[in-house]
Structures are given as C-alpha cells and as structure tokens.
Image (cartoon, rainbow, N blue to C red):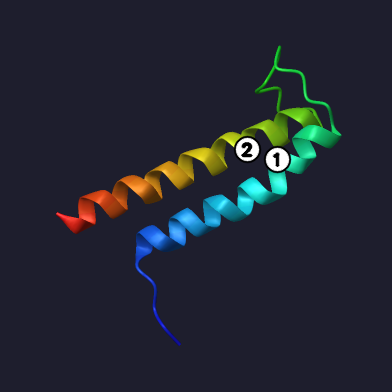
Amino acid sequence: MKDYPLYKKIAFFGFALFLISFPLLVVLETEYDKPFDLESDQGIVTLLFITSIVLMLVGFILSKIKRK
C-alpha cells in the first residue's frame, strides 16, 4: 500500500467533505443571512462546506511549498 504525502491526504479529505456538503447546501436551500448559526442544520452544512474549501486550499498550498 502506497503511503501518500500529508498534503494529498488533506486535499482529498477536503474534497470528500466538499462532495458531501455541496449537495446538502442545494437540497436544504441554504440562505446566507446567518451562515454560522450552529443551532440549525443549514449552519452546520455551511460550516462543513467552508471547512472543505479551506482544507483543499491548504493541501494545494502545502503542495506548492513542498516542491521548492
């Protein structure tokens, strides 16, 4: 079994969260007036979506730093 670098693992986990959270954003018809209302389902899904974007960006940035 191949051991992948940390930046690939982070980026893949972010992408997996993205694939889960984006359809939920569409199904729940999330409104963006209260994006961080953690007492509702829409707030939690929005937080997951933002976390997935951040993780994908961190993986991309780490891959660029690693190559230098």
Disc 1 to disc 2: CB gap under 8 Å: yes
Q: Residue at x 37, y 58 (%)?
A: 7
Which image quadrant is residue 50 in? top right
Please state which of residues 40 and 26 is positioned toward the viewer in this rendering.
26
Kind of residue sitting beneath label 2 = Phe
Taking 62 as reference, is 46 above or below it? above
Label 1 vs 2, first from the N-terminus: 1
Q: Is residue 38 left or right of residue 11?
A: right
**Residue hosting label 1:** 22
Which label number is shown at residue 49?
Answer: 2
Q: Residue at x 71, y 12 (%)?
A: 33
Q: Is residue 56 left or right of residue 18?
A: left
Looking at the picture, how far across and down is residue 53, in whole percent? 52, 39
Q: Residues within 10 Å of mark 1 (few under 14, many from 20)?
A: some
- Direction bottom: furthest residue: 1
Q: Is residue 7 left or right of residue 44?
A: left
Kind of residue sitting beneath label 1 = Phe
Which image quadrant is residue 21 in? top right
Q: Secondary structure at mark 1?
A: helix
